Amino acid sequence: MVAPLPVAADGQGSRMSAGWAVAAAQAVLVAAVAPLLLGFTRAVRARLEGRGGGRIAQPWRDLRKQFRKEPLIPADAGVFFAAAPAVLTATSLMVAAAVPYLSTQNPLASSTDLIVVVGLLLLGTVALALAGLDTGTAFGGMGASREMTIAALVEPTLLLSVFALSTRVGSTNLSAIVAAGTTDQARVFSPASALAAAALAIATLAEAGRLPVDNPATHLELTMVHEAMTLEYSGRDLALVEWASAMRLTILLGLLATVFVPWGVATNLHPVAVALAAALFVAKLCVLSGLLAVAEVFTAKLRLFRVPELLAGSFVLGLLAVITSAVLA
Amino acid sequence: MGLSRTMRRVGRMAEPAPRTSAHRPPGAAGLGGSVQVRHVDAGSCNGCEIEIGQAFSPVYDAERHGVRLVASPRHADVLTVTGPVTVNMAGALRKTYDAMPEPRLVVAVGDCARDCGLFAGGYGVLGPVSDVVPVDVQVSGCPPEPAAIVSALRALTGR
């Protein structure tokens, strides 16, 4: 289902190139901001825990150093191990360019269907899980099996929570959903979107590997999920995997902000409107990641066998959101 | 809530940063303010491990200087080794060192790592760390203070 987007009559060619420029700007913005957002989250956590903590730019320093180091390929690893960093980074950049973060007039709008976005994110997840299996180590396989268990429970919730908003727009196209949100503010505050936001927030935590599903600060072998799959990566490959993971967190937090708080997203391609949208986007991301850090200080990691209960709960919230929006519409 | 009250009461726990040690090994130049550390206990009494744990605690807070402990030697730039190298751990230490990508540095923590300390001549002891892997930085003490460990790591990050 693709809703026709309003197309202005003036200069089709220049509009297209401006649209591509905005799509590229989105990808660059997400790629640049993602490590800083990670540093910001760590800094907020450190402050609350009474530590000094690293600088906000520390994740960029880590990445810069890792990019300069040689990547080692384990003896038993094959093509999946070698391909995963590139696939993960490419899918993340693709999603970052396609989701209407800055402007709903995106040249990729016709293909930014919700199902495509979730599919691209899942492609990255599967690539990394296969890479974890490919190394042939015990931890790689363990991490991959856990990641797949979580992914199988998270992806339906990701879809359902946004379906709750798409029932009223009559389209699963993200640009159409966001455009409808910016024009009709009353639509944004409804019981259905509150339920859907809660469901998507839990799905985001699980998909991005944050507490209470996975602890990004742990090195305990028995609890690692994301880190268990990346144990064999080094140098440039590790930098790509870590960068892409940071981008995925930014993408999902950005999706949460853009779909449920769509104020400020430009509906045209005017440079001023897009710049304002970029500033608001970064501000929303800062607020969300600050909340994430505070929540993480107060939360303990769930036992792995309790994680399906949490995710099933978020799925039910998503289902209720869809029913509510269908009934109240 | 109890936790938020404790946070407000305690505030910032971190002490002022210790002086950095003047000696900066040549291999540390390319690290650019970021050091990931993998730790190997090659046969220590765990006294040094407690001090290393303290170096990363909120009080000494090595993380503010750009140092982080990691779960895999593949992710690490620096290998910290404690204890005299025992016969059983020599192979594991060598394998860990070989698994690290270049450029890599080794920090020997504690007197035992330097000259086997109390355990010199023991039947299970192979020798000091420098007999098994090349050592770049030595932190002395039995056990060394957390501040000494932090200042040695600060010399590597340069921050």
Image (tube, helix red, strand yellow):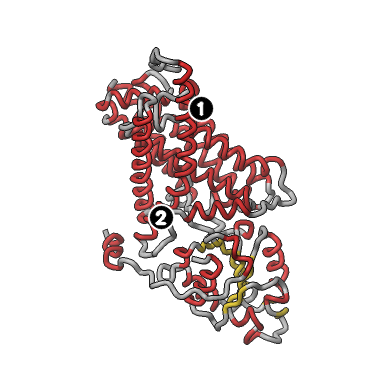
Give the residue type that dot 2 points to: Ala
Q: Residue A142 has which mark? A: none
Give the residue type that dot 1 points to: Val
Q: Residue A300 has which mark? A: 2
* Residue farthest along the left direction in this orientation: A186
Q: Position of residue A169 (x, y in %)?
A: 36, 20
- State whether residue A198 appears in this view: no
Q: Nearer the viewer, mark 1 or mark 2?
A: 1
Q: Quadrant of residue B32?
A: bottom right
Of residues A124 and B122, the one drawn nearer to the viewer in this rendering: A124
Quadrant of the drawing holding the N terminus of chain B: bottom left
Q: Quadrant of residue B135?
A: bottom right
Q: Position of residue A252 (x, y in %)?
A: 44, 38
* Residue farthest along the right direction in this orientation: A75
Q: Residues within 10 Å of mark 2 (few under 14, many from 20)?
A: few
Precedes in sequence: disc 1 or disc 2: 1
Q: Residue A116 has which mark? A: 1
User: Residue at position x 34%, y 30% from top?
Assistant: A273
